[in-house]
Amino acid sequence: MKPITALALTFVSLLLATPAMAQFQRPDDAVKYRKAALSVMGTHFSRVGAMATGRAPFDAKAVADNMAVVETLSKLPWDAFGPGTDKGDTRALPAVWTEQAKFKAASEKMQGEVVKLNAAAKTGNLDAIKTAFGATAASCKACHDDFRKD
Ligand code: ASC
């Protein structure tokens, strides 16, 4: 193998092995990104919540459309909690970094509940949506209680 080829291959494998964190130029960018993802997710989840709790008229298509957005967004924030992103304009508690396994489990619990709520949303069954909404909201709250300043 030519040295230049070997060098190029090394470079490419280093790029592929680079942690997700490197997708953010600065820690502040990661903080902004995860807050934006969580905020937009909250907006769409609240629209589902309004219908699940009877504060807004039930519209099965709107629930399904909003839940599709929530499911996509629920996957995004976590790579943006990398090392060095505990400072700045954030309400994330130090426990995010000192109890990483617990934080990961909490994020996975929420994502799992979102998948179930999204499945219920696709059936259009309001009772199933109500049940799954309650479980999902509880998983949001559990993580906020342990890992976010109020
Ligand atoms: C929402 C939202 C949250 C959760 C949480 C559930 O609508 O934005 O963060 O529900 O309040 O307890």
Image (cartoon, rainbow, N blue to C red):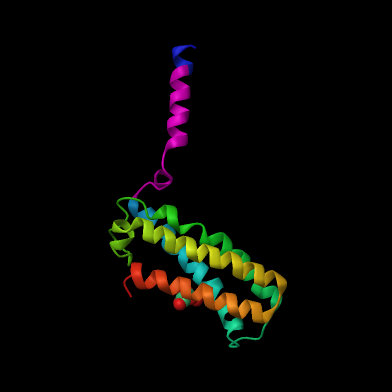
Magenta residues span 6-26
Residue 47 appears anywhere in the view: no
Residue placed furthest toward the top: 2
- Closest to the observer, 109 or 25: 109
Q: Position of residue 43 (x, y in %)?
A: 52, 73
| Number of numbered discs on residues | 0
| 49 vs 115: above or below | below
Q: Horizontal placement of 17 versus 70: left or right?
A: left
Q: Position of residue 28 (x, y in %)?
A: 34, 55
Q: Position of residue 83 (x, y in %)?
A: 32, 50
| 67 vs 19: above or below | below
Q: Horizontal placement of 149 versus 68: left or right?
A: left
Q: Give me the residue at 58% from left, 85% from top.
A: 53
Q: Horizontal placement of 51 versus 61: left or right?
A: left
Asked whether 92 falls inside the magenta stretch, the response is: no
Q: Give me the residue at 62% from left, 65% from top.
A: 68
- Residue 150 in which image quadrant: bottom left
Q: Give me the residue at 51% from left, 67% from top.
A: 40
| 133 vs 71: above or below | below
